[in-house]
């Protein structure tokens, strides 16, 4: 039996798997500032994106055997240091792919058909029927930068509504869709560019990146906030280089960049890419199964 701190919540299904396996769960969240003092009581900690598990927390928890992340990215965990201490790291890379892909499409529709300003002005009693002339997604070219699970899920959904899909990745990917390793060339062809890459030390989307994009293109970021230079993007929106931005993730969260958030060409959500009932259930089941298997000596892979 393991003592497990479930610090950012887990689905009821996931919780039941762990309890049925005989593990002791602490479901009450430990604030980040108290985590160093409390983590030493546990053999495992399960987090999402809110809780950060850094070197100092790992050093304070000599009995820690596993860190589980409900989601794809591991930016909030010092993975290499944890592994050097023999701590298992597990996450759920497949569970939220469909939900994130659908959110990207939601932003694309919202921007292309002016759904947000049309909704807000109607609530103010306005009837601006002629003002909101949109564009169709059917027939447009979508460049997906980062062609992993989420990118490929988005590709299937976008192709189903008639979009031409181009996938880009730094590694070769076998796919039924057009695939390129020439990012610069693809940027000049795409009407929509959607980011699906991990956090990086340098901005992927910089002034230079935007300059290579097609004039009047739309940018979507439901990946990681740190991959996009928010100031450069706002400038590109202001001068018309970009027609719109759909964004779910930010350099600082909770987001404080009001210039970006309140921009009339932006469709914005508060990091809800995986926030669907279905995704949360899958995340909980996948994570709990991996944790239960690990402590049962079966290995973490479900």
Image: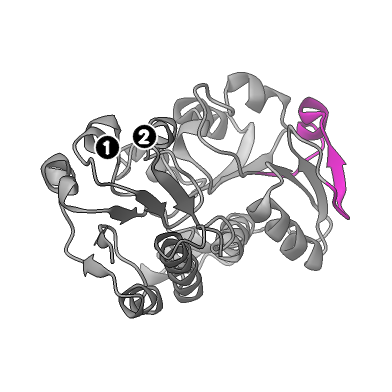
* Colour approach in the figure: one colour
Label pair 2/1, CB-CB below 8 angstroms:
yes
Provide residue 33's location: percent of width, then percent of height. Answer: 13, 41
Image quadrant in which you'd find residue 17 = bottom left
Which quadrant of the figure contains the C terminus? bottom right
Which quadrant of the figure contains the N terminus? bottom left
Examine the rendered structure and indicate whether residue 109 appears above or below residue 125.
above
Provide residue 192's location: percent of width, then percent of height. Answer: 70, 46
Residue beneath disc 1: 58
Q: Could you give the CA–CA distance between mark 2 and mark 1, rounded to whole angstroms?
A: 8 Å
SS category of the residue bearing label 2: loop
Q: Which residues are magenta?
A: 174-194
Examine the rendered structure and indicate whether residue 53 appears above or below residue 291.
above
> Upstream in the sequence, badge 2 or badge 1?
1
Q: Residue at x 76, y 35 (%)?
A: 171
Residue beneath disc 2: 85
- Residue 261 or residue 179, whichever sits in front: 179
């Amino acid at each position: 039996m393991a003592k497990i701190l479930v610090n950012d919540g887990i689905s009821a299904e996931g919780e039941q798997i762990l309890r049925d396996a005989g593990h002791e769960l602490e479901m009450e969240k430990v604030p980040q500032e108290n985590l160093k003092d409390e983590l030493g009581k546990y053999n495992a900690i399960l987090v999402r994106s809110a809780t950060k598990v850094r070197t100092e927390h790992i050093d304070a928890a000599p009995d820690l055997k596993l860190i589980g992340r409900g989601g794809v990215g591991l930016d909030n965990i010092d993975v290499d240091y944890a592994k050097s201490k023999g701590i298992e790291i597990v996450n759920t890379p497949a569970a939220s792919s469909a939900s994130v892909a659908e959110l990207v499409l939601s932003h694309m529709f919202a921007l292309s058909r002016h759904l947000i300003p049309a909704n807000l002005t109607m609530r103010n009693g306005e009837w601006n029927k002629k003002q909101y002339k949109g564009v169709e997604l059917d027939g447009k070219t979508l460049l997906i930068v980062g062609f992993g699970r989420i990118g490929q899920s988005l590709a299937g959904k976008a192709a189903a509504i008639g979009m031409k899909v181009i996938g880009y990745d730094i590694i070769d990917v076998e796919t039924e869709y057009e695939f390129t390793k020439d990012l610069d060339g693809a940027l000049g062809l795409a009407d929509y560019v959607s980011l699906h890459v991990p956090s990086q030390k340098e901005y992927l989307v910089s002034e230079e990146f935007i300059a290579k994009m097609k004039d009047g293109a739309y940018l979507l970021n439901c990946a990681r906030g740190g991959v996009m230079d928010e100031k450069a993007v706002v400038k590109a929106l202001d001068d018309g280089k970009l027609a719109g931005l759909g964004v779910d993730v930010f350099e600082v969260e909770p987001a404080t960049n009001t210039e970006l958030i309140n921009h009339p060409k932006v469709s914005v959500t508060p990091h809800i890419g995986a926030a669907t009932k279905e995704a949360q259930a899958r995340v909980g089941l996948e994570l709990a199964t991996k944790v239960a298997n690990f402590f049962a000596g079966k290995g973490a892979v479900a």
